């Protein structure tokens, strides 16, 4: 029996309290933090522990959730992903993904996104996935294009980070586009 949450390289799982150290260390990468949303002041180890415990105790919603991306070999956390902006009436959702610096460019993000899309399209009946990528995040732009996402537009100068304004590139993929590529 194979879990729907396991891919070739990663498995998506709930947060565990002991994951706090990994995610706390990821916060030290300011460029990645800016690329995923915004830079925050440093948090204490105690605060990071508390956050991980709270996340691990949260009951997951079927459509809006946060998961850890862990390697299939040793279950080590390498990043995280979450769904948001869920519109059940129109069948759309958005997601965010982040991979920690030492784990990038190993196929973990691509594998995690395909697992997520398969669940949201085939188990939750959504018809379209959306992702916003800041224009300075070349790696994520390339990833989404390689996965078959369509660039649908651009929100100009909508994000301020690192002393400059930048665009948010809007990507989308329909269930038909996903099925043609991955089913």
Image: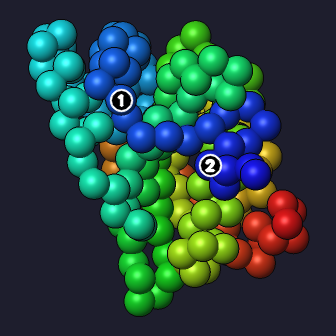
Q: CA distance from mark 1 to mark 2?
A: 16 Å
Q: Residue furthest front?
A: 1
Instruction: From the top left corner, tell me how far across and down residue 166 is, in percent.
Output: 42, 40
Residue at the (58%, 80%) spot, across then down: 125
Q: Nearer the viewer, residue 146 or 18?
A: 18
Number of on-image labels: 2
In the displayed structure, does residue 167 sit left or right of residue 120? left
Q: Which residue is mark 2?
A: 5
The label shown at residue 47 is none
Instruction: From the top left corner, tell me how far across and down residue 99 is, in percent.
Output: 53, 27
Q: Which residue is mark 1?
A: 16
Picture quadrant where residue 89 is located? bottom left
Task: Provide the secondary structure element on which disc 1 rests.
Answer: loop
Compared to residue 85, the image places residue 50 above or below, namely above
Q: Nearer the viewer, residue 13 or 151?
A: 13
The reply to whether residue 100 is in sight is yes
Q: How many residues crowd mark 2 within 10 Å: few (<14), some (14–19), many (20+)?
A: some
In the displayed structure, does residue 36 sit left or right of residue 59? right
Residue at the (34%, 50%) spot, across then down: 158
């Amino acid at each position: 029996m194979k879990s729907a949450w396991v891919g070739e390289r990663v498995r998506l799982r709930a947060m565990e309290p002991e994951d706090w150290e990994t995610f706390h260390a990821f916060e030290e990468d300011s460029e990645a933090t800016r690329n995923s949303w915004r830079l925050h002041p440093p948090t204490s180890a105690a605060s990071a522990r508390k956050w991980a415990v709270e996340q691990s105790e949260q009951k997951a919603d079927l459509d809006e959730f946060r998961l850890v991306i862990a390697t299939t070999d040793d279950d080590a956390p390498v990043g995280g992903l979450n769904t948001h902006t869920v519109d059940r009436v129109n069948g759309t959702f958005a997601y965010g993904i982040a991979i920690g610096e030492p784990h990038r460019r190993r196929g973990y993000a691509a594998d995690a996104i395909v697992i997520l899309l398969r669940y949201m399209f085939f188990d939750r009946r959504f018809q379209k996935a959306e992702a916003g990528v800041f224009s300075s995040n070349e790696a994520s732009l390339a990833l989404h294009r390689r996965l078959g996402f369509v660039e649908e537009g651009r929100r100009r100068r909508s994000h301020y980070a690192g002393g400059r304004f930048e665009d948010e590139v809007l990507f989308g993929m329909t269930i038909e586009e996903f099925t043609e590529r991955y089913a």
